[in-house]
Image: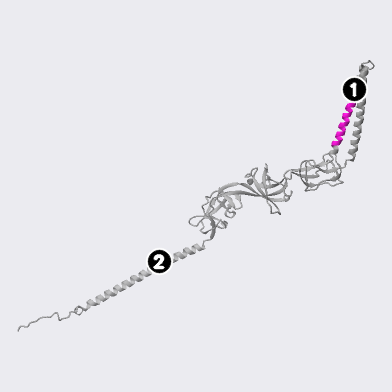
Amino acid sequence: MNYDARIDTSDAQFDSSELNPLDGADDEDRLSRRRVWIIGAICLAALIGLWFLTHRSSSTDAGTSAASQAPLVSVISPGRVTVIGKINANGTLAARRELPVGVAGEGGQVVQVLVEPGDWVGAGQVLAVVDRSVQVQQQASSSAQIQVAQADFRLAQTNLDRALKLVERGFISKADIDRLTALRDSASARVRVASAQLGELQARTRRLNIVAPAAGLVLERKVEPGQVVGGGSGILFRIAKGGEMELRAQIGEVDLAKLAKGTMAQVTPVGSSKTFSGEVWQLAPVIDPQSRQGTARIAMAYAPELKPGGFASAVIDSGAVVAPQLPDSAILSDSKGSYVFIIDQNNKVQRRDVKTGLISESGIAIVEGLTGSERVVVRSGGFLSPGETVNPKAVRQ
């Protein structure tokens, strides 16, 4: 028996899973494992990112904390400026040329004083008059002696003239003429002697007047009417010649070496707000071994505020230099000399030895050790140490 066995594939539906059910389970496992790996990778990446973020934040916080703990210091970059040097000094006011006046003659009792302190006087002006009653009588006596001598001279001259007329007639000898000539010459000499004596008395009388040797300002009077004065009475008047004043400023030997004659100065008396211009006209040739100072004499014109014996301060010019300039607070010193602290690029403190120069109101010139571009610690340098890290803050000079 013949059977026609045919399989119609068009009508049959073929399911591979039905043929091999284990193949479907493997696919699902692979997909699950892939999902797990992807999720794990994502979690690991997230953990790594979180670790980096946490480490970076910690590092930043640590840096910020370290920076916040570093001391804050003020710094300046001084640059280079023209520094006009100033020397401050103190001293005593006095007359530039003080003229002490005393008794030039014999002296006696003062009958009149004609000036007071603060008066201006001229050369030769009478300051005080001494009693001269005795000298007046002596002058009168001397004048009388001159008249007697002149009378004797006239008589001797007349006798000589008469004898000269008789000698020609032979009544008078040559010897008589010589005798009469000698008498005439002797009388003439007595006239000159008497005149000289009168002149001496007049000169002594004039010296009884106490006079000013030069024009100037009377500073002091030490005599009163009725006082008996003489050669041992000492100084009776003090006069400032021409009224010129000066300040005798005491200056250290280092600063004194910087000055020269003709240097200008500004002088301010104590208790006065007025300033007077002066000029250094003399520098002391010696230094006091105890104080290590010398005297600079600053001449000034007269002014009522300049009172001899008073105290005054002076600001004296001492030249100019182009250099970095720092305030006093920035400059430190020790056994090695002067130095400053500068801040390097890593904000660390470094010591820099310097040499100071001219001093002015705005600061001190640094002539060696700085170029002017450095960052220099302005204050509190004494609390810092080389190598220390700081937090610099720039300030204006």
Position of 40 with respect to 82 (left or right) is: left
- Range shown magenta: 182-203
Position of 84 with respect to 157 (left or right) is: left
Mark 1 crowd level (few <14, some 14–19, many ≥20, 10 Å Cα): some
Q: Amino acid at mark 2?
A: Phe
Residue 271 position in % (x across, y down): 71, 54
Q: Residue 192 in magenta?
A: yes
Residue 347 position in % (x across, y down): 50, 57
Residue visible at 25% across and 75% down? 27
Residue at the right extreme, as displayed: 171
Instruction: Locate the N terminus by quadrant.
Output: bottom left
Q: Nearer the viewer, residue 257 or 225?
A: 225
The residue beneath circle 2 is 52
Q: Quadrant of residue 232?
A: top right
Q: Residue 204 in magenta?
A: no
Element class at badge 2: helix
Instruction: Locate the C terminus by quadrant.
Output: bottom right
Position of 100 with respect to 338 (left or right) is: right
Q: Nearer the viewer, residue 159 or 212?
A: 159
> Can residue 150 be seen by looking at this rendering?
yes
Instruction: Look at discs 2 and 1 and give the one toward the viewer.
Output: 1
Q: Quadrant of residue 174?
A: top right
Residue visible at 40% across and 69% down? 50
Q: Amino acid at mark 1?
A: Ala
Residue 4 position in % (x across, y down): 7, 82
Q: Nearer the viewer, residue 220 or 301?
A: 301
From what the image shows, is residue 42 above or below residue 293? below
Element class at badge 1: helix
The residue beneath circle 1 is 182
Q: Quadrant of residue 147?
A: top right
Q: For marks 2 and 1, give the CA distance.
A: 144 Å
